[in-house]
Amino acid sequence: GPGDIAVMAVLFSLTVAKGIWASWEANKSRREGPGAVATSEGFFLAGRKMPFWAVGLSIFASNIGTEHFVGQAGAAAASGMPVSIYEWSAGLLIFFLGWGLAPMYLELGLTTMPEWFERRFNAPCRFVIALISIIAYILTKIAATLFAGAVLLEVVLEISMWVSVPIVLAFTAVYAASGGLRAVMFTDVGQATIFIIGGAVGLGWSLA
């Protein structure tokens, strides 16, 4: 209905505005020391200057997406609580990453995970790990997220998947490539806020 269309339009507009603002802020300091987007540390690690709340919300938003609100919610409705075990294990692994592995990565001054494999083994190993990671991410995370989002847009706004997916991909690629991790994380902050509020509203509506 008109209400659904209005909500989707407002949320999409806010997301676009947030991405543009974050990319502009990141590029404003392009030549200001190690946090500049032009450097590998500035692009991949946001210059190691992000506030703790942005890091936390970005981790949350990176692990929650349309595949959860559409796919896992439907699977839970069909089969019950066992579906949630997947996310409980993910939470434990995130804690292990933060308390166990991240300090080691920071101490070594690593920028990306494949870089560690190059230091530990050799350059061909780094290439193989990077290639496997990209292919796996495209076939699992990105594909599922795009499909679930396309299903939602087709049901609510009657926009074909072949139209919505290229638009989402193009917008995401532009702000991520221009603003680096800083732009992605600040956009994730807005997305996490939407997820939390929307999830709470959906839970209350379903239990009412």
Image (cartoon, rainbow, N blue to C red):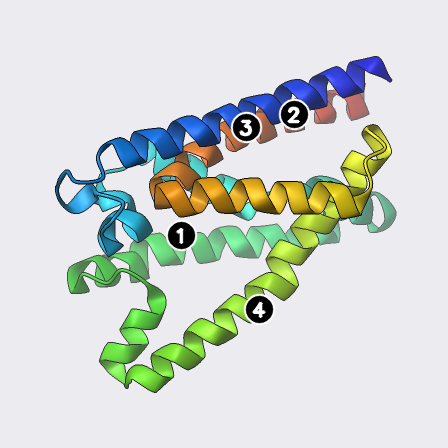
Which residue is under mark 1? 95
x and y percentages locating residue 9 in the rendered image: 68, 21
Q: Residue at x 77, y 20 (%)?
A: 5
Name the element at disc 3.
Answer: helix
The local crowd at label 3, few if under 14, some if 14 to 19, many if 20 or more residues have their Cα within 10 Å, is some
Q: Is residue 169 left or right of residue 163?
A: left
Indicate which disc, 3 or 1, sits on the residue closer to the N terminus: 3
Q: Is residue 160 left or right of residue 92?
A: right
Which residue is under mark 3? 15
Q: Is residue 88 above or below residue 7?
A: below
> Which quarter of the picture shows residue 101?
bottom left
Question: Quick check: can you spot residue 130?
Answer: yes
Q: In which quadrant will I find the N terminus? A: top right
Marks 2,4: beta carbons within 8 A:
no
Q: Amino acid at mark 1?
A: Phe
Name the element at disc 1.
Answer: helix
Which residue is under mark 2? 198
Marks 4,3: beta carbons within 8 A:
no
Q: How much space separates mark 4 and mark 3, taking CA atoms?
A: 26 Å
> Which quarter of the picture shows residue 180?
top left
Indicate which disc, 2 or 3, sits on the residue closer to the N terminus: 3
Q: How much space separates mark 2 and mark 3, taking CA atoms?
A: 15 Å
Q: Nearer the viewer, mark 4 or mark 3?
A: 3
Q: Is residue 188 left or right of residue 72?
A: left
Q: How much space separates mark 3 and mark 1, taking CA atoms?
A: 28 Å
Q: Nearer the viewer, mark 2 or mark 4?
A: 4
Q: Amino acid at mark 4?
A: Ala
Q: Residue at x 28, y 85 (%)?
A: 122
Which residue is under mark 4? 136
Name the element at disc 4.
Answer: helix
